[in-house]
Image (cartoon, rainbow, N blue to C red):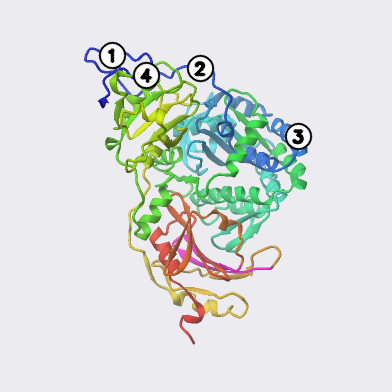
Amino acid sequence: MRTTLKRGVGRGATLNGNGRVAVPPSPLGSVTVYRQPPPPPRSGRSLAFQILGWAALVLAVLVGGTTGGAYLYLHESVAAVAPKTAEVKKALEKLDIALPGEPATALMIGYDHRADEAKNTPSRSDTLMLVRADPGEKTISLLSFPRDLSVEIHCPGHTPFVSKINAAYATCGPTGAVQTVRDLTGVPINYIVTVNFRGFRQLVDKLGGVWLDVDRRYFNDHGGPTGYAKINLRPGYQHMNGTKALDFVRFRHTDSDVYRTARQQLFVRAFKDQIESAFSVTKLPQVIKVVTSNVEVGQGGGKDVSARTVLRYALLAYSLPAGHTFQARIDGLSGLNDLTTSPENIQRAVREFRNPDVESPRKATAVALGEKLKEHAPAPRETSVLVLNGNGVEGAASSASYLLSQRGYQMLVPANGLRADAPSYDYFRTQVYFDPRVKGAKPAAKKVAALFGSADVGKLVPKIRALGNGAMLVVVLGQTFHGRLASAPIDQTPQREPANVVSGASAAVDLLRQYRNEIDFPLMVPTRIERSSWVDREMPIRTYWIDPEKKHRAVRLTYRLGNEYWGVQMTDWADAPVLSGRNFVRKIGGRRYELYYNGPRLHMVVLQTDGATYWVVNTLLDRLSNETMIAIAKGLQPLAKVGKS
């Protein structure tokens, strides 16, 4: 017999006068957060996500690959990055304590105090970035705030006032930054990481530099106290030392903070790749010295972060699946010196940050290529769910069932009046089991698991199926359930649109012919280009040695689209670090294309041939649609076959 939600659910559930479960009258505020029994020892995966920030990642990834002698450095180093300054120690009082097994969030503050400024000039926070790690979905999310974003500043002892967001740090240090960002976003902040930009430069150098794709020519030789910082970079994928990387990340002379924020996030992804590939045991003492001299890391509750926590987080971050680093973006920004946007745009970015659509690259690919999407999750009203108590907490199953019903799920209870209890109460992580015989059950299980923040997905096992009453999904609550559900991810599947391209071989064919005798691999001509684009006037083409050993050549074509730039990179270097992060491979018209995404936005398409690779690289803000990117890549044709003279 199959029954619906009208008998007791979970331990100690009571009935009201009409025979239904007595549940809280509102999904907000009335749901009790129950006291959990003492948890068993934490698993490696849950412990791993208790610390965030690239400083910890650097320390742990470096040490994680070494032997026992190097492990001693880790204990000393973690202690050395504990909060030292009174300002950071005070900020810890504003942090939230991370719950075991749940996603955790850190606020990263990059600050600077320049040598030519007066002694008492406050330091500035050139970088404010939230970083979130989710152990259940195996994702890392980034949300950067342009320093010129106009917001209400909240500082202890000050009346709230409206100013640029970096005024929070300048006015009252890390405490002001934490309070302002939390009030703006509503996101609980569990960790704080402060980084001196002097350390930024030194650390990049100690790791042997970093590989970055430069979208255009950057040049300014008029530095000084009243001018913009000097910079001299040419377009193309290239190796940079710490000074050049910092110049690139902080530049905003001829564009705005919107683009600087995009460059910062580009650097974070590239720097993570560099850590993974460039570690050497001989560099360890120097690297640790730089980190411990310029970084402070603190957590909610005031306790120092343990070495074991740092190490396990880093090992998990090191093994993140390709495409599982997501960059949320605040849209609708307007203005030059003072950027503004609507509260709705900020909250949408926060939702994307807290609940990234993990399936968005796959769905975006299917839309752009006209592929039929594989099995997708049915709507909540078409998804039957039964919740079992696996943590021994009074009323936990009743609470979870009510919350899921408010999201539209069809809730069931065990048949024949059985209690909604799992076979045991020793579940630490919540489990979502699905019936593999039901179409759409697996993606539905993943969707429900995301609501629990930290949950595992698997096929129904006999002992759980026996209690499932025919439900598509059976949720067994673990000790990671704390009486609430996360927001559902925003479906970021883009709408299909025609490729916005026109014939464009004439824009580059003559430029390429000038260099065909200097390059050993075949050059390709973009015969289709974005409709409003043309080759950049300042530096339309560049040829150079791409690798430090000067074994591989490269050619970069740069196209301008308004104030943004996209490009075509050609090289015979098949092992460039950036090529290791592809999401998907597709064969189109007999040619192999590799697809690289930023969330649902296609950032790079790489055509692979026997002798070379050809990359179509989107703008910093990924303005070119996915269909346009693919059309440009498909339009790449050998120079020898285009407009023969």
**553 to 280, vertically: above or below:** below
- Looking at the rendered image, the quarter that the N terminus falls into is top left
Please rate how many residues cluster around mark 2, counting C-alpha atoms within 10 Å: few if below 14, some from 14 to 19, many from 20: few
In this picture, residue 164 sits left or right of residue 532? right
Q: Position of residue 42 (x, y in %)?
A: 57, 27
- Residue at disc 4, secondary structure: loop
Q: CA distance from mark 2 to mark 4?
A: 16 Å
Q: Identify which residue, 67 or 110, lies in the foreground.
A: 67
User: What is the C-alpha distance between the residues marked 3 and 4?
Assistant: 48 Å
Q: Mark 2 or mark 3: which comes first in sequence?
A: 2
Q: In the image, which residues are magenta?
A: 551-572
Q: Residues within 10 Å of mark 1 (few under 14, many from 20)?
A: some
* Residue located at (48% from left, 85% from top): 644
Q: Residue at x 62, y 35 (%)?
A: 312
Mark 4 lies on residue: 10
Q: Is the residue under label 3 in contact with that under label 2 (CB below 8 Å)?
A: no
Residue on which the image places disc 3: 72
Is residue 62 within the magenta segment?
no
What is the spatial separation of the Cα atoms under label 1 and label 2, in whole angstroms?
Answer: 25 Å
In this rendering, the answer to whether 467 lies above or below 631 is: above
Q: Is residue 110 visible?
A: no
Is there a contact, CB below 8 Å, between mark 2 and mark 4?
no
- Mark 4–mark 1 Cα distance, whole angstroms, equals 12 Å
Q: Earlier in the sequence, mark 3 or mark 4?
A: 4
> Residue 37 got which mark?
2
Q: CA distance from mark 2 to mark 3?
A: 34 Å
Q: Earlier in the sequence, mark 2 or mark 4?
A: 4
Q: Which corner quadrant of the image does residue 94 belong to?
A: top right
Q: Earlier in the sequence, mark 4 or mark 1?
A: 4
Residue 339 % position (x, y)? 45, 45
